[in-house]
Amino acid sequence: MEIQGKIVSNTKLNIYTQSLIVKPEQVKKIDFEAGQFMLLKLGETLQRAYSITNPPNQNDRLEFVIDTRPGGPGSQFALAAQKDDLVSLSGPFGKFRLRATDLPKVFIANGCGIPPLISMIEHLLHTGKTMPVKLYWGMRYQHELYFAERFRALKRAHPNFSYTFCITRPAKEEPFCATGRVTNVICLGIEENRKAEFYLCGKLAMIREMKTILTQHGIPSENVIHEGY
């Protein structure tokens, strides 16, 4: 599906991350599943894939998180985009989706792997699922955790949701923060999550390492769903 959209906001989340929200022009809603992505057209023959951050119940908009550090066409577009600019998109695409089970869910991300997991988590909680839902998100510094308050609000509203921020370069102690890489921190909690489904998103090196760790701890491969970049 190809759509035209209008940028309603372009917000700096931290020094290298932008949040772009687009509303469709010709249709009132966009049907998608949590975890999917859209292709954003940047030129006649150039497009980039960005995961949808908002949950499917918010289908009158599309929220994207764009890392501007690579400095390529997508980064340049995000830095230059202005409110009311028109954009062309196509989609949704992707097989990185929630499974229709009642198993506990564990979500693991590093860096900009967090957007599709936010969509999944918020979808589960919005639809009233009561299984344990846990998030482990790895970053270098606490001030880079641009969606920290979003997760704090979810925890206050939903007792079955919990999160752990994994910080490799902590400046101070903070509740719900653990020191170390996400692949190290998760090892401490695997036993209590042995019957869960694991959803992984982030850099390919993290995905490979995490899959090895989970396999070594007896987690069935069919319970590990992942998408890397």
Image (spheres, grey):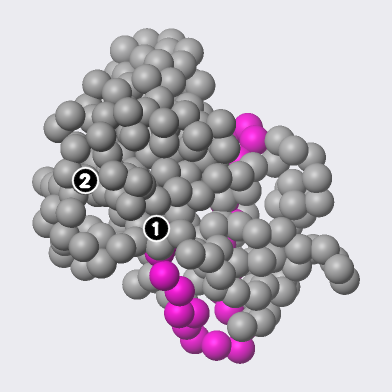
Say which of 217 and 37 sits in front.
217
Q: Which residue is mark 2?
A: 196
Residue nearest the observer in this picture, 157 or 221? 221
Badge 1 vs badge 2, beta-carbon distance below 8 Å: no
Q: Quadrant of residue 33?
A: bottom left
Residue occupying image coordinates x 47% and y 29%:
209
Q: Find out whether residue 27 is within the magenta segment.
A: yes
> On the rendered image, what quadrant is the N terminus found in?
bottom right
Q: Quadrant of residue 84?
A: bottom right
Whichever of callouts 1 and 2 sits on the residue coming sooner in the sequence is 1
Percent across and percent down for residue 183 are 40, 25
- Label 1, label 2: how many angstroms apart (C-alpha)? 19 Å
Q: Position of residue 200 (x, y in %)?
A: 42, 43
Mark 1: which amino acid?
Ser
- Amino acid at pointer 2: Ala
Answer left or right for 161 relative to 97: left
Q: Which mark is residue 119?
A: 1
Q: Is residue 74 left or right of residue 221?
A: right
84 lies above or below 13: below
Residue at x 53%, y 65% (from the top left corner) = 94
Circle 2 crowding by C-alpha within 10 Å: few under 14, some 14–19, many from 20? many
Q: Kindly identify the residue that appears in the image at 50 percent across and 71 percent down.
A: 61
The segment highlighted magenta reads 12-35
